[in-house]
Image: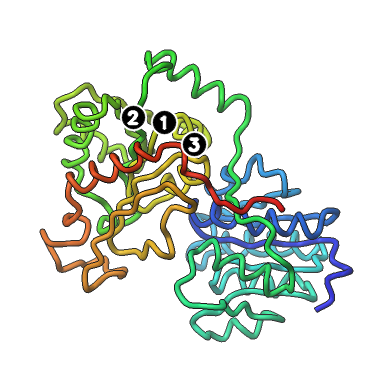
């Protein structure tokens, strides 16, 4: 594989917020090895904010999934428009981190002479790549799994650090929000109760009791975070709580990141904000049930993972039949508070990765 003529690189990651954030070490490594190249990344719209201030990218192309669902003319026209744009760029190298058909097709239609990607299921899309990434071992953490693309190119991995940045406006927002709240000199925990699927979510009524315990045992205020999707969840938690309820709603993803960075610790389910906490160096108490924390756990050191490892986990069963014994309900409040104790005892050790630029 001759990489000496690579001048334009297309990176594809058509997944969710956390997945895009976990791909940032790949971007940093590509920039390290191709300092003069133009690097453009295609992501789903809504995840592009993660990359807004990423210094290693020349451009981010958001793909609006809502406009390409189904088989209407709108989908066809939008897809053709994006493909035409990509073909005009005349990319030399495509790195598809998506592990899915859409990314493989997009990479193939780019016309790039070097196209690498994943094909874990052994599907026909493997024929659309010039080289398939074959992970060196099973159950790699997703960061390491994606970095296998760098190794497949025959390049050394020089950083494993997540990269999430924000601007002056987000920094000022967090500072002013805390001053207005009267929390500028107070310790607080950020808590995000949401999950993409219900079977990955800790019971909502317990979050209210958690906030009470954080105050009683550690004098930690609790700041609940959530977007439009979590509005109902936050109302439910507020209904069950006995202490003043504090939440930050209707804020941007990077404003959320700036607030998490100022908190002493983060508590939440396996979701994007959990990965944001790891990226900004805030220790996380991560609650896992149906997904494998060895693959999806918070990246770096200083975190605590609560995972019951029930016989049917990991899974993706929307119709979980465990009822009151499901894996998330088996995580007790006392177990979370013990994890909080351990995090606070080793406070300051939640580093993103011991390996940054060499």
Q: Nearer the viewer, residue 309 or 24?
A: 309
Residue 247 to residue 68: above or below: above
Q: Quadrant of the N terminus?
A: bottom right
Residue 39 to residue 49: above or below: below
Residue 230 to residue 73: above or below: above
> SS of the residue at dot 3?
helix
Q: Which of marks 3 and 1 is nearer the N terminus?
A: 3
> SS of the residue at dot 2?
strand
The residue labelled by disc 3 is 257
In the rendered image, residue 60, in percent from the top left (x then y), is placed at 68, 50
All told, the count of numbered labels is 3
Judge from the rendering whether residue 296 lies leftward or rightward of residue 342; answer left or right: right
Judge from the rendering whether residue 44 lies leftward or rightward of residue 7; answer left or right: left
The numbered mark at residue 223 is: 2
Q: Which of marks 1 and 2 is in front?
A: 1
The residue labelled by disc 1 is 263
């Amino acid at each position: 594989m001759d990489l000496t003529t690579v001048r334009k690189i297309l990176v594809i990651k058509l997944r969710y917020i956390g997945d895009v954030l976990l791909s940032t070490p790949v971007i940093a490594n590509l920039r390290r090895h191709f300092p003069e190249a133009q690097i453009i990344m295609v992501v789903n719209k809504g995840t592009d904010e993660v990359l807004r201030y990423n210094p290693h990218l020349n451009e981010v192309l958001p793909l609006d999934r809502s406009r390409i669902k189904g088989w209407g003319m709108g989908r066809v026209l939008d897809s053709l428009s994006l493909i035409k744009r990509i073909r005009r760029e005349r990319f030399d190298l495509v790195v598809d981190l998506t592990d899915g058909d859409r990314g493989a097709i997009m990479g193939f239609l780019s016309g790039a002479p070097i196209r690498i990607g994943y094909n874990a299921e052994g599907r026909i899309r493997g024929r659309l790549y010039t080289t398939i990434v074959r992970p060196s071992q099973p159950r790699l953490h997703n960061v390491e799994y994606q970095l296998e693309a760098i190794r497949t190119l025959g390049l050394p991995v020089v950083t494993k650090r997540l990269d999430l940045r924000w601007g002056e406006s987000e920094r000022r927002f967090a500072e002013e929000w805390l001053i207005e709240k009267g929390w500028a000199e107070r310790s607080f925990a950020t808590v995000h109760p949401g999950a993409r699927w219900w079977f990955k979510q800790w019971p909502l009524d317990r979050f209210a009791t958690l906030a009470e315990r954080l105050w009683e045992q550690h004098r930690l205020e609790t700041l609940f975070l959530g977007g439009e999707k979590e509005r109902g969840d936050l109302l439910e938690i507020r209904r069950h709580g006995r202490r003043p309820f504090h939440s930050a709603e209707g804020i941007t993803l990077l404003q959320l990141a700036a607030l998490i960075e100022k908190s002493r610790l983060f508590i939440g389910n396996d979701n994007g904000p959990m990965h944001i906490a790891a990226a900004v160096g805030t220790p996380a108490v991560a609650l896992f049930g149906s997904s494998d924390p060895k693959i999806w756990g918070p990246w770096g050191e200083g975190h605590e993972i609560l995972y019951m490892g029930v016989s049917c986990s990991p899974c993706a069963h929307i119709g979980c039949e465990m009822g009151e014994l499901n894996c998330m309900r088996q995580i007790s409040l006392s177990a979370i508070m013990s994890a909080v104790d351990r995090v606070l005892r080793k406070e300051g050790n939640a580093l993103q990765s011991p390996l940054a630029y060499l």
